[in-house]
Image: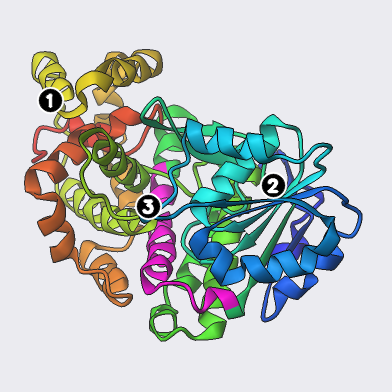
Amino acid sequence: MKINDLLGREMACSCGKKHKVDIRYVCVEKGAIQKLSQRCEKYERILLVADENTFAAAGREAESQLGGKMAGKLIYSSAHGHVVPDEKSIALMEENLPQNCDLIVGVGSGVINDLCKYVSFEKKLPYIIVATAPSMDGYASSGAAMITAGMKVTYTTHPPMEIIADTDVLCKAPKEMIAGGYGDMVGKYSSLCDWKLGALLHGEYFCQEVYDLVKDTTDHICTLAGGLLAGDEEAIRALTEGLILSGISLSMVQTTRPGSGSEHHLSHYFEIVGLIKDEFSFSHGINVGYGAVLMAKVREDMRKAERYIFQGDDQERRLRDWQRIYGDFVDEVAAIQEKAGWYRRFDGAALQEKWPEICNILSECPTREETLRMIGQVGLDYADFEKTYGLEKIKDALRYGKDLKDRYTILWPYYFWEDRV
């Protein structure tokens, strides 16, 4: 299905719901940025937002396209390698909003998109994102990942009004960012599996049509790795459209289920622990790609078991581990799980009863070897992942990555499984 077939309309679905996509325009093509002037025709007081790198990549051309309609410009400093989407960055954008601002135009990828998304939502303004890298699937989603009080929190905001992605710009993005976008797509196999498990075990809402849309898109993207590594324009365009389509799918079902599961929980864990302990973390998409390999191994190990053998929660050990890992932020983690209640209401009997059905779902995903091959095709070396984080940190992620979210995934049955590592 073409992206523009989904935009600005309400669609009745076989799942019984009506899916609505509020984004009104998406353009992914060579020279797309030349359309920015026309797309901003009715606006008069525009704030342009970028960082030093993205301004060099596409910001100057965006500024030229906006001309006299640009009433303000904010270029975040990237002197330390990256912009942090925290309270200071939010305040800086709010301070730079011109009087009577009627549109924000962001030029960038993950962080710039999230900052524009968050501030425009708070100020009840529309925003347009000019994409500079096919690095993640958040362009079209309503979630904004921010660092609040030192912790990463995803806020529900609104998607952009329009997305403009010029393949001339995207093809020049750093290889690491392109690999990150590919890793984010490989992770969809894991998230789709977790969505099915949530539906089977807890009666969660499930839409087969959206599932198939994301699955078919992922299957296609995963055949393009060679072209992505070579900077092939058609492969880059397809990856970008796939990432945007993934983000749109979340809006369609009003849940992150199609695009975020246990692999994202692992990524979130590495990012959060990196922030807390001031340790290196790979970018989001690369963490997701590596997380997909870990989850493929978990699914394979669990499928080998003839039945599910439940073990209880060693609460004393868990609380000690939480304190060791999260330090001053342990109360925030405890509050998430107290509200979610999974430790109290985990149902091992249901897993034992439905174990054959569960194993059938787990078997639908690529194997660990297949997943390793996929990420390896874009230059992601799993040995580098193990060396960077270390086996103990990776084991901690498998045990406690689930605790940073309230969502049920295969990481919960894994935690309570007798044979887990």
Label 3 belongs to which residue?
Answer: 284
Q: Magenta stretch?
A: 169-194
Residue nearest the viewer, comparing 220 with 198: 220
Question: Which residue appears at 50% of the width and 49% of the height?
Answer: 111
Q: Residue furthest right?
A: 42
Residue toward you, 211 or 360: 211
Q: Residue at x 59, y 54 (%)?
A: 139
Q: Position of residue 152 (x, y in %)?
A: 40, 34
Pointer 2: residues within 10 angstroms few (<14), some, or many (20+)?
Answer: few
Q: Say what amino acid the circle numbered 2 marks.
A: Ser
Q: The residue tagged with tag 1: helix, strand or loop? A: helix
Q: Please report whichever mark, 3 or 2, sits nearer to the chain's N-terminal start.
A: 2
Depth check: 81 or 384 in front? 81
Compared across the picture, whether 181 is left or right of 394 comes to right
Under circle 3, the secondary element is: helix
Residue 14 circle label: 2
Q: Main secondary structure of the magenta part?
A: helix
Identity, as a three-letter code, of the amino acid under mark 3: His
For the residues labelled 3 and 2, the Cα–Cα distance comes to 33 Å
Asked if residue 291 shows in the view, the reply is yes
Please give the label number shown on residue 283: none
Point out residue 158 in the picture as x, y percentages from the top left corner: 67, 39
Per the image, the residue denoted by label 1 is: 324
CA–CA distance in space, label 2 to label 1: 48 Å
